[in-house]
Every structure is written in structure tokens, then in C-alpha cells.
Image (cartoon, grey):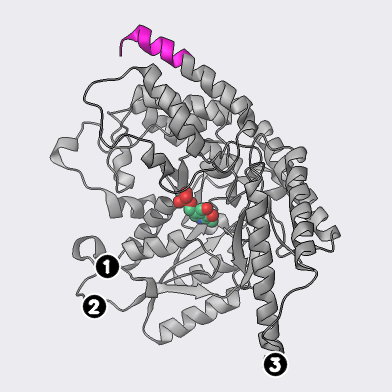
């Protein structure tokens, strides 16, 4: 592609993107396609002869746009709502153009050094001490995998060389996390060869926070039984309820038993940028590692996850391996990012984070995060005030967990089987009611909410985190929920 062609289509695409961002709410949040529709509309084979950008973009509009789930829609309230902000998109655009491959300092001094500087800025904004160094990975799943690999390196003698298989000198091991920890912990434990049985799920209290007394008991029981405790994961902002584990009390236990403490603050951590919310990271300075995802609630386009680590020596001990062809004169003087992870090549991800932090400034970021939390509190008040709905968890951040309460919960068929069976049947019928409510509300195209389970009950989640979400969008979600709940209720009356 010559420079003029690139320029012409570049302008055309930037124009398309600007319009898309301006009018993202014109699209249905959830696409109206069935599985297989998109693949069926695409040719089975790559073209033999090159095609023009006009032809390619026409197919992009015709085939792919109708199959997009619009994460950029201000009515996107599912999972953790995220934003591709203007400065973040421009940063990603530049990063692709520059095609930096920052495995070594030499292969991109700027990418290497900007990463360290930008992660220092973010660390300071979140109130974490300078004992933490940061490294960027793609996702929190990979950050946590690396943290637990470092923990394994610290606790298991010679694991790097001898591995785990067939070793008579090693007892079974345990990694503890709350029953509400993210499934990425399980996946990391699987991949590290410890086996899923190595996970000790610690019970939570009524606010879905890990119970330190239960953690202490589990460690004592395991130690008595000859199991080797390795690490504890505390979560600040769990995936379902956004609950906060008591990090200071968990840090006390980890220090007493010399365990690696990893804090999963993938979603919630950025809230500590607000001085009045700094306390959510109390105790985190004592952790060995902490993950936070700027691609979740910091307006950086997917993907960018940061692992802060106080024991980079352990991460390096686990992963540094320098092949002959990767030796450079700067070794030992400058940082080589390939030393802190499994991947060799790495994108210039720091660029988009740098552009986001500079464009919004700390004050702009604080204002947006505070507004999201205000909107969540407002929605929670609406839920609390409506007798047809109930809230099912506290709201420490910007996610509200709730459900509709049908006026008649159907306990049919359980009449003669006692109170427990009746409760169960009625709970199942409330779940079905909420499932149907969720389907109807999401079919509107105006909003997209997702669900989870807490205390075995189906819970609807409204997650606010999008830059372009205003009170009007939250009010629209509430209006749809109330109207469809009333219609469903009238049908079953
Ligand atoms: C608390 C928590 N940790 C980790 C993850 C995994 O994030 P990623 O998609 O970046 O791997 C999530 C995802 O939502 C999460 O909520």
C-alpha cells in the first residue's frame, strides 16, 4: 500500500471511527444475529487476487458490523462495562503503525522505558509504594498466572529445573482464594501443574468477603495434614458482587506463614485513584503482587493488564532465559522485558495507557470514576425504593446486584414436601422470572445487562463503567426493567 492510498483510506477510516463513537447508541447493543450467521456470509477461502480497500470496507459494514456487540454503547451494562476512549484508540493505532516488538531494550528503548515510567505514574496514582515495579501483560488472567508462577518459584525448591512431576520430595500444595475469586485463578493453577484440587476455596461472609478466620483454619488444617500452603489470592472487587476481601487481615496471615499474597484488583483497583477511596487498597503494600486492568475501568481499549510485583527477582527467576541470539550489550544494564514473562515478543501497549493518563489527567480520571460510582448509588436507591425489586449485595464500586421480585413466586409441586422444598421451588421460579426479564430487557437493543449467581440465587448485574454513559442511560435501563417486570408479573397473575 503506497503512502497516498494509505493516507486516503486512513482518513476514511478515522472518519468512520469518529462517527461510530459519536453515534454508538444508534446500534443495538447486542447484535441481532444467530450463531453461524457471520461465518456463513464470508467466503470459505482467502482471495487469490488482492482486493481494494473499498471492497473490504464495504464487506466490513455489510457483514461484520451487524455481528458486533457494542462494548462502546453507553447502554452496555454487562460484565464490567469498558471504554475505548479517543486517546486510547489513537495510542493503539500508533502502536500498530510503529510495530514495536519490545522483547529487548534494544528492540525498543522507548517501549521499554515508557512502560516503566507510565506504570510508575499509575502506581503513584493508586497510592501503591515504589517497592512495586510493574509489567504489562495482555489480561489479568495472564498477570495472575505470572504472579502464581513467581509464588511457586519462591516456595518450591528447584521447580524451574526439576518441575513437579514424579517428585517424591514434594508434598501436595495449596493456593487459597475466596469462593468468589475469578476463574482465572483456577486456570493459572491448572497451567502451573498444581491441579485444580490444589485450590482451597475459603468461605465468605454475608458481604461476600473472604473470612480470615476460615483462611487461618484452612491453613492450619492443611499444615497438619502435610499439605504445603503456597499463596493466597485476595480480591478487591470480585467479579460477581464486587466485594472486597480484608487484605490487611489476610496479609497478617500470609506474613505469619510466609505465603505469597497476590491481590486481584483487576476491576476495583483503579478506584484507589480517588483519595476518598484509597482505603480499598489498605494492606496491598504488603502483598507480593497486585493486578489491575486499565482495560477494564481506566478507559484503555482492550487489552492491557498491569502486574505490580514486589518480588521481581522471583518473577525473573521463574522466566529469565537468554538464548544466544537474544544476548545484547545492554544485558544487566537496561531492562529486557522478555525476562519478566513467558512471551518473547510484546506489543507497545504502554503507549495507549500513557496517552490516556495524559489526556484525561488524574483529575479527569477521578471525576469520571466518581460519576460512575454516583450513578451506581443512584440506581441502587431506585432498586431499594421499589417493592418489586431487591438488592442482593452492597455497592462498593460501580456495579449493582439486584433482582425483580415477582408478586407470586410459583411453588407448585412442592406443596406437600415441606418448607425447604417449597422455598427451593419458589426460588427457582424467581430465577426463571429474572432470566426472562433479562432476555426481554436485552432484546430492546438499548441496554445489555448480564447475570451471575450469589447464594444460589440468580442475580442481575448493572455495571457502570463506560465513558459515555449518563444518568439518562441508567434511567432507561431502570425504565425497561420496571416495565418488563410489570408485564411479566401481569402475565403470571
Ligand atoms: C476480579 C477479576 N479478575 C480477573 C479477571 C480476568 O480478566 P481478564 O479478562 O483481563 O483476564 C476478571 C474479569 O472480569 C475479574 O473480574
* Residue 368 placement (x, y as % from top left): 69, 37
* Residue 377 placement (x, y as % from top left): 77, 51
Stretch of the chain drawn in magenta: 1-11
Q: Which mark is residue 347?
A: none
Name the quarter where the N terminus is drawn.
Answer: top left
Q: Residues within 10 Å of mark 3 (few under 14, many from 20)?
A: few
Q: Is residue 342 visible?
A: yes
Q: Nearer the viewer, residue 212 or 32?
A: 32
Q: Residues within 10 Å of mark 1 (few under 14, many from 20)?
A: some
**49 in relation to 398, above or below:** above
Q: Which residue is mark 2?
A: 169
Q: Is mark 3 within 8 Å of ligand 1?
A: no
- Pointers 1 and 2 in contact (C-beta within 8 Å): yes
* Residue pictured at 30% horizontal, 79% vertical: 171
Q: Which residue is mark 1?
A: 157
Q: Residues within 10 Å of mark 2 (few under 14, many from 20)?
A: few
- The Cα–Cα distance between marks 1 and 2, rounded to whole angstroms, is 10 Å
Q: Which residue is mark 3?
A: 416
* Residue 342 placement (x, y as % from top left): 29, 48
Q: Earlier in the sequence, mark 1 or mark 2?
A: 1
Q: Earlier in the sequence, mark 3 or mark 2?
A: 2
* Residue 34 placement (x, y as % from top left): 48, 47
For the residue labelled by badge 3, is the local secondary structure a helix, a strand or a loop? helix
Q: Nearer the viewer, residue 320 or 269?
A: 269
Residue 323 falls in image quadrant: top left
- The Cα–Cα distance between marks 3 and 2, rounded to whole angstroms, is 57 Å
For the residue labelled by badge 1, is the local secondary structure a helix, a strand or a loop? loop
Is 138 left, or right, of 158 in this rendering? Answer: right
**203 in relation to 480, above or below:** below
Amino acid at each position: 500500500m503506497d503512502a497516498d492510498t494509505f493516507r486516503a483510506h486512513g482518513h476514511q477510516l478515522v472518519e468512520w471511527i469518529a462517527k461510530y463513537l459519536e453515534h454508538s447508541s444508534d446500534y443495538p447493543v447486542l447484535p441481532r444475529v444467530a450463531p453461524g450467521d457471520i461465518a456463513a456470509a464470508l467466503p470459505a477461502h482467502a482471495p487469490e487476487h488482492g482486493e481494494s480497500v473499498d471492497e473490504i470496507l464495504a464487506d466490513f459494514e455489510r457483514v461484520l458490523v451487524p455481528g458486533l456487540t457494542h462494548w462502546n454503547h453507553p447502554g452496555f451494562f454487562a460484565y464490567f462495562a469498558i471504554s475505548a476512549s479517543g486517546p486510547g484508540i489513537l495510542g493503539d493505532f500508533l502502536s500498530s503503525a510503529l510495530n514495536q516488538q519490545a522483547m529487548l531494550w534494544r528492540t525498543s528503548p522507548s517501549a521499554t522505558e515508557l512502560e516503566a515510567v507510565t506504570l510508575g505514574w499509575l502506581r503513584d496514582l493508586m497510592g501503591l509504594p515504589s517497592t512495586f515495579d510493574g509489567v504489562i501483560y495482555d489480561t489479568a488472567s495472564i498477570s495472575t498466572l505470572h504472579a502464581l508462577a513467581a509464588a511457586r518459584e519462591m516456595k518450591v525448591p528447584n521447580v524451574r529445573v526439576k518441575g513437579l512431576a514424579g517428585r517424591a520430595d514434594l508434598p501436595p500444595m495449596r493456593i487459597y482464594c475466596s469462593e468468589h475469586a475469578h476463574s482465572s485463578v483456577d486456570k493459572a493453577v491448572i497451567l502451573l501443574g498444581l491441579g485444580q484440587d490444589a485450590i482451597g476455596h475459603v468461605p465468605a461472609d454475608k458481604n461476600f468477603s473472604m473470612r480470615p478466620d476460615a483462611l487461618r483454619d484452612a491453613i492450619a488444617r492443611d499444615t497438619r495434614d502435610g499439605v504445603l500452603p503456597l499463596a493466597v489470592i485476595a480480591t478487591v472487587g470480585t467479579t460477581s458482587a464486587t466485594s472486597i476481601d480484608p487484605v490487611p487481615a489476610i496479609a497478617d496471615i500470609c506474613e505469619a506463614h510466609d505465603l505469597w499474597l497476590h491481590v486481584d484488583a483487576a476491576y476495583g483497583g483503579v478506584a484507589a485513584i480517588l483519595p476518598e477511596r484509597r482505603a480499598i487498597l489498605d494492606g496491598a503494600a504488603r502483598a507480593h503482587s497486585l493486578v489491575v486492568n486499565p482495560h477494564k475501568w481506566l478507559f484503555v481499549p482492550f487489552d492491557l493488564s498491569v502486574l505490580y510485583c514486589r518480588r521481581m527477582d522471583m518473577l525473573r527467576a521463574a522466566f529469565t532465559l537468554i538464548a544466544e541470539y537474544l544476548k545484547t550489550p545492554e544485558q544487566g544494564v537496561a531492562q529486557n522485558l522478555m525476562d519478566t514473562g513467558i512471551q518473547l515478543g510484546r506489543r507497545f501497549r504502554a503507549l495507549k495507557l500513557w496517552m490516556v493518563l495524559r489526556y484525561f489527567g488524574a483529575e479527569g480520571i477521578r471525576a469520571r470514576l466518581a460519576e460512575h460510582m454516583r450513578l451506581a448509588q443512584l440506581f441502587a436507591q431506585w432498586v431499594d425504593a421499589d417493592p418489586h425489586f431487591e438488592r442482593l449485595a452492597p455497592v462498593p464500586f460501580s456495579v449493582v446486584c439486584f433482582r425483580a421480585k415477582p408478586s407470586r413466586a410459583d411453588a407448585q409441586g412442592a406443596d406437600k414436601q415441606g418448607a425447604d422444598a417449597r422455598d427451593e421451588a419458589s426460588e427457582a421460579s424467581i430465577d426463571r422470572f429474572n432470566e426472562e426479564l433479562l432476555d426481554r430487557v436485552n432484546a430492546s437493543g438499548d441496554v445489555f445487562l448480564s447475570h451471575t449467581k450469589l447464594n444460589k440465587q440468580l442475580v442481575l448485574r448493572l455495571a457502570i463503567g463506560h465513558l459515555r454513559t449518563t444518568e439518562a442511560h441508567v434511567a432507561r435501563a431502570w425504565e425497561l426493567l420496571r416495565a418488563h417486570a410489570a408485564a411479566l408479573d401481569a402475565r403470571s397473575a
